[in-house]
Image: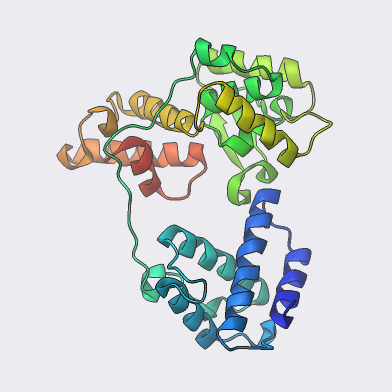
Amino acid sequence: MTPLEWDLQRVLNHNRDGSRGTQYERKKMLMQFARDVHQLGFRGLRLRNLRHKHLEKVSAAWRTGKPEGRPISNATLKNRLASLRWVLEKMGKSNLLPNSNRTLGIQVRTYIPEQSKAMTLTEDVLKRVTDNHVYHSFRMQAAFGLRRSEAMKIHPTWADRDDKLVLKSSWTKGGRPREIPIRSQHQREVLNAAKAFAKNGSLIPARKSYREHLMTWEYQTRRAGLSKTHGLRHAYAQLRYEELTGRKAPILGGTSARELHSELKEQDHQARLQIALELGHSRTSITNTYLGR
């Protein structure tokens, strides 16, 4: 272990922000950073001696495919820089990295799909699910637009607050707690069924860890004939857009934002803001992936 890896490990041990999944990914990216710094010639570097020139050289190397042998994607690069900003904030050295990725020469692209990736959780699909924990997680994911990990970790009884579903920071990506409105009888029925099954626990069996149950989830997903269940979030977002605006989402043939007059543009923006919050995103632009533009 290099001195920088050791220093970073100490920071990670003393600051366990976010879910276990977030902590695991953050550690992996920071350890990669330390190894790359070492390979680029900054041997023996300590965290307290980290300077702008080190960060600049590493980020430039990542963009050109060094030292890992291939360029990394913009998304991976942004995630690595987010982890670096996290550790710099803990050290009180946030000024070493600019807040804007554009300053570092990273293109900001907004992906707008041409076809909807929404999927419906039909009774035929559910009949193929033989694990009851996964069964209720699938239904919760579809009804509330949850991420896979959230649908597994959630304690339905704790999360039920009458007119809203409350998610703890330890269940969510990035450790951001959030609330999702309970708007329909269907949502209430799905939640009540999950509560009756899980009692005061989560939708992960008591005898299993998250990682162990993830293998069961993936097996049940294949058994149900699904590749992934992220399409359930797309369907949730598109349903919410129609509820909030009275129009189909652009990805489903609805009027595009460019064609809306000023009043409806504002309505579109507010709907996207609400949907982004319910899905656990901090940027409205991410809704383009779910709704089109």
Q: Looking at this view, name the residue that lies furthest to the right.
A: 207
* Colour convention: rainbow
Q: Looking at this view, name the residue that lies furthest to the front.
A: 69
Residue at point 46% right, 70% down?
99
User: What is the quadrant of residue 261 in the picture?
Assistant: top left
Q: Nearer the viewer, residue 178 or 100?
A: 100
Task: Tally the numbered discs.
Answer: 0
Q: Is residue 216 visible?
A: yes
Residue at point 69% right, 85% down?
46
Q: Nearer the viewer, residue 177 or 104?
A: 104
Looking at the rendered image, the quarter that the N terminus falls into is bottom right
Looking at the rendered image, the quarter that the C terminus falls into is top left
Q: Is residue 176 above or below residue 147?
A: below
Q: Nearer the viewer, residue 96 or 159?
A: 96
Residue 138: percent from left, percent from top: 58, 24
Q: Is residue 9 above or below residue 242?
A: below
Q: Is residue 130 above or below residue 161?
A: above
Residue at point 51% right, 76% down?
67
Q: Is residue 19 visible?
A: no
User: What is the quadrant of residue 205 in the picture?
Assistant: top right
Q: Nearer the viewer, residue 24 or 199?
A: 24
Residue 189: percent from left, percent from top: 60, 13
User: What is the quadrant of residue 267 in the picture?
Assistant: top left
